[in-house]
C-alpha cells in the first residue's frame, strides 16, 4: 500500500470516528474538535490559513449556538413545534450561508487582516485544499437545510392556510427531519477531517521564498528603462 492510499485510509477512519462522536454527543461537539484543530494549527508551523478558517467556523458556530438557545429555549419556547422548527432551520440555513460566503472570500479577508495586523505573514496567505473542499461541503449543508425546511413547511401546511383535508396527506413527511441530525453530523465530521488532513498536507508545502532586504534594496536602485 503506497503512502497516498495509507493516508486516505487513515482519514477515512478518522472521519468515521468523528462521525460517531458527533452522533453520540449530539449538538456542538464540533466546538471542542475545532479547538483541537486550532491547537494543532498553532503547534504546526505556518498554518495561518487553517487558523483563519477554524476561527471563522468557531465564530459562526458560537453565533448558531446562541441563536438556537434564544429561539428554541427563550423567545419561542411556548410556541408550537412547527414554529420553532421553522425558525431554527431558517437560522441554521442563514448561518451555513454565512459560512459559505466567508469561505468563498476567506483568502481576501485573511489578506486584508494580515496586511493590517501582521504584514510579515503576507506570503503565508493563499487558497488551501480546505478552502475549496469546505465551500462544497457547506453548499451541501445549505441543500440539507433547505430540504428539511421545505419538508417542515409541507408537513404543516394546515398552519399556513392550506385546507386540512389536503394538507393531511403530507403529515407523514419526515424523512429529512429524522435524518437531519445524522446528515449534519456526517457533514460536520467531514469538515473536521478536511481541516486535519489539510494541516498534515500543508506541512509538505515548500516554504515561501522571502525577499531579503538586500535584494529589495537592489531592485529599488536598479535603473528603470523605458521602451
Image: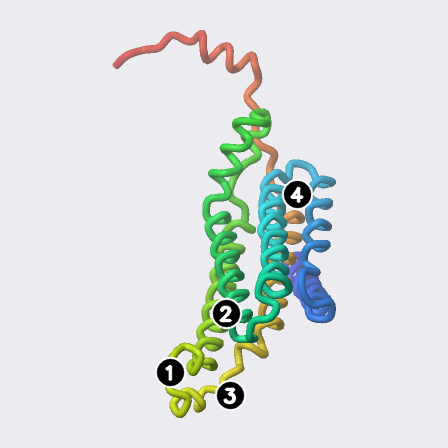
Q: Is residue 1 visible?
A: no
How crowded is the residue under tag 2: few (<14 C-alpha within 10 Å), some, or many (20+)? some
The disc, 4 or 3, on the residue closer to the chain's N-terminal end is 3
Residue 186 vertical position relative to residue 114 in the rendered view, above or below: below
Image depth: mark 4 or mark 3 in front:
3
- Tell me the residue at 56%/71% (across/down): 79
Instruction: Find residue 203 and report its image quarter.
Output: top right
Kindly identify which residue carries mark 3: 172
Q: Residue tagged by mark 4?
A: 203
Residue in front for this viewpoint, 84 or 77: 77
Q: Nearer the viewer, mark 3 or mark 1?
A: 1
3 or 1: tag closer to the N-terminus: 1
Question: Marks 3 and 1, how far apart in space?
Answer: 16 Å
Q: CA distance from mark 2 to mark 3?
A: 17 Å
- For the residues labelled 1 and 2, the Cα–Cα distance comes to 17 Å
Is 212 placed left or right of 136 in the picture?
A: right
Q: Is residue 80 above or below residue 191?
A: below
Residue at 55 percent of width and 75 percent of height: 80
Tell us which disc is closer to us: 2 or 3. 2
Amino acid at each position: 500500500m503506497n503512502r497516498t492510499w495509507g493516508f486516505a485510509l487513515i482519514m477515512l477512519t478518522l472521519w468515521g470516528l468523528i462521525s460517531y462522536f458527533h452522533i453520540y454527543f449530539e449538538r456542538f461537539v464540533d466546538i471542542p474538535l475545532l479547538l483541537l484543530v486550532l491547537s494543532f494549527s498553532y503547534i504546526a508551523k505556518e498554518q495561518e490559513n487553517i487558523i483563519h478558517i477554524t476561527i471563522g467556523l468557531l465564530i459562526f458556530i458560537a453565533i448558531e449556538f446562541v441563536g438556537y438557545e434564544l429561539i428554541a429555549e427563550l423567545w419561542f419556547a411556548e410556541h408550537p413545534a412547527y414554529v420553532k422548527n421553522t425558525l431554527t432551520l431558517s437560522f441554521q440555513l442563514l448561518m451555513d450561508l454565512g459560512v459559505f460566503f466567508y469561505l468563498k472570500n476567506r483568502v481576501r479577508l485573511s489578506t486584508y487582516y494580515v496586511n493590517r495586523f501582521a504584514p510579515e505573514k503576507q506570503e503565508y496567505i493563499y487558497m488551501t485544499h480546505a478552502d475549496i473542499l469546505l465551500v462544497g461541503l457547506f453548499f451541501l449543508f445549505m441543500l440539507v437545510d433547505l430540504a428539511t425546511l421545505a419538508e417542515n413547511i409541507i408537513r404543516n401546511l394546515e398552519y399556513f392556510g392550506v385546507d386540512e383535508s389536503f394538507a393531511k396527506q403530507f403529515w407523514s413527511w419526515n424523512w429529512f427531519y429524522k435524518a437531519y441530525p445524522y446528515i449534519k453530523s456526517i457533514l460536520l465530521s467531514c469538515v473536521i477531517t478536511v481541516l486535519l488532513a489539510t494541516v498534515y498536507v500543508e506541512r509538505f508545502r515548500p516554504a515561501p521564498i522571502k525577499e531579503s532586504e538586500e535584494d529589495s534594496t537592489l531592485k529599488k536602485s536598479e535603473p528603470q528603462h523605458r521602451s
